[in-house]
Every structure is written in structure tokens, then in C-alpha cells.
Image (cartoon, grey):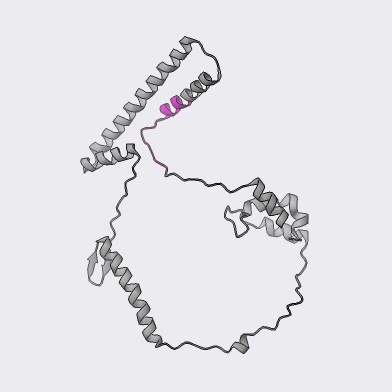
């Protein structure tokens, strides 16, 4: 098992990945996507090959047209968003913060029914939850009155022999059957080996996995 984990960690080292929230930009049309791919192709050719002056001028003209198209698409989308919004000032600031890279939080309306009253203030709801759980612990403590249930430890004692350990032998067919029944999830246990990796490596380590 140590040899397998050593090879596994060398082949799949742990890397830190920063996840970004996906932003749905409705102004990105299919035509803009095609133009973006074309601009990347032209920029790659400009960097890798020696081009004539007229070709460089052609690429620069295409870049200017591409930027104008993006600017106009953004402007139309923002105008549509602001005009269809009830609070136009708030919508405008949302667009500004989005362009500046500032994420805005959508406040969800939380309403709690407490007896006959309805509470919508988030701070008041948090204080109610805090006091409820704090008082619940005190009530349970008062009900128990400090008494604890006692168990007979002698009945729970298990006779063991620390000098021997027996494990039933496992055949290759049993190991293969267990591996095939794995769901192939990407989550791992304490050994950091996922089920999907075990299933893919099964053909290489069936003969040795029975001894792990």
C-alpha cells in the first residue's frame, strides 16, 4: 500500500485551485465567440511568425472592430437590464460594481414565524436562534438534575488476545467484484485515493490488491 500511495502521490500531486464564480454574460453572442476565437488565432500567428506590415495592419483593424462590437453589445445589454429593472439606480450600481469586479450580495428575504408574530429582521432572527439553543441546553440540564445513567463496565468487556491477529484471506475474484461495485466517485478517504482511480487501476493491481 505504501508503494502504491507513493506512485499515486507522484503521479497526482496536490495542487491549490482557486475557484471563481461563473458569471452569465448575456451579451456574449455566438458571433462574439467566433470573433474571439479568430482574434486568438491571429494573435498567435502574429507572435509565432514574421508577418508583413499589411498583415499586421489587418490584425489591428480586426482588433478595433472586435472591441467596438463588445462595447456595443455590453451597452445594449446594460440598457436593457436597467430599463427592465424597477429600481434603476440600484441596477446601474450593480452594473458598475460588476465591471469593477466587486461582487454584490443578494439579500434573501428571511421570515420567521415566532408564535403569532412574524420576524423578518436578520439580526433579530439570529438572536432568537441563539437564545433558543442556549435555553434548550439549560432546560435539558435541569431535567437531568445532574444524574447520569451508569452502565456495567464488566458486561461490556471483550476478551482479546493482543499477541495474535487473524484476517480471512481474500481472492482476486473477490477484490475484482468489490472494485467493480464501486460507484466511481471523485471523493476520497483518509488515503486520498478516489474510487474512480481505484477502478481505473484495477487492471494493473488486481494481483497485488488482495495483499493490501
Identify the residue at horizontal 73%, vertical 78% (top origin): 162
Left or right: 30 as drawn, with respect to 99: right
The answer to whether residue 210 is magenta is no
Figure check: 39 above or below 88:
above
**Which one is in front, 180 or 167?**
167
How far across and how far down the image is residue 106, in percent?
31, 50
Task: Answer yes or no: is residue 200 visible.
Answer: no
**Which one is in front, 39 or 138?**
138
Identify the residue at horizontal 38%, vertical 81% (top origin): 140
> Where does the magenta region start and end?
22-37
Figure check: 208 above or below 128:
above
Q: How many marks?
A: 0
How far across and how far down the image is residue 27, in percent?
36, 33
**Which one is in front, 91 or 16?**
16
Identify the residue at horizontal 23%, vertical 36% (top origin): 83
Figure check: 193 above or below 117:
above
How far across and how far down the image is residue 179, in percent?
68, 57
Amino acid at each position: 500500500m505504501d508503494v502504491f500511495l507513493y506512485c499515486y502521490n507522484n503521479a497526482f500531486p496536490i495542487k491549490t485551485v482557486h475557484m471563481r464564480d461563473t458569471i452569465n454574460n448575456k451579451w456574449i453572442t455566438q458571433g462574439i465567440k467566433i470573433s474571439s476565437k479568430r482574434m486568438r488565432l491571429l494573435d498567435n500567428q502574429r507572435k509565432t511568425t514574421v508577418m508583413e506590415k499589411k498583415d499586421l495592419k489587418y490584425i489591428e483593424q480586426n482588433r478595433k472592430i472586435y472591441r467596438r462590437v463588445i462595447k456595443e453589445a455590453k451597452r445594449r445589454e446594460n440598457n436593457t437590464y436597467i430599463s427592465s429593472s424597477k429600481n434603476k439606480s440600484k441596477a446601474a450600481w450593480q452594473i458598475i460594481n460588476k465591471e469593477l469586479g466587486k461582487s454584490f450580495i443578494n439579500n434573501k428575504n428571511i421570515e420567521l414565524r415566532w408564535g403569532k408574530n412574524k420576524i423578518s429582521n436578520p439580526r433579530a432572527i439570529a438572536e432568537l436562534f441563539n437564545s433558543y439553543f442556549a435555553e434548550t441546553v439549560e432546560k435539558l440540564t435541569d431535567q437531568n438534575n445532574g444524574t447520569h445513567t451508569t452502565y456495567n463496565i464488566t458486561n461490556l468487556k471483550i476478551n482479546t488476545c493482543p499477541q495474535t491477529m487473524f484476517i480471512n484471506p481474500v481472492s482476486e475474484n473477490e477484490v475484482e467484484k468489490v472494485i467493480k461495485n464501486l460507484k466511481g466517485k471523485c471523493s476520497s478517504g483518509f488515503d486520498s485515493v478516489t474510487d474512480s482511480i481505484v477502478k481505473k487501476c484495477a487492471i494493473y493491481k488486481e494481483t497485488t490488491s488482495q495483499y493490501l
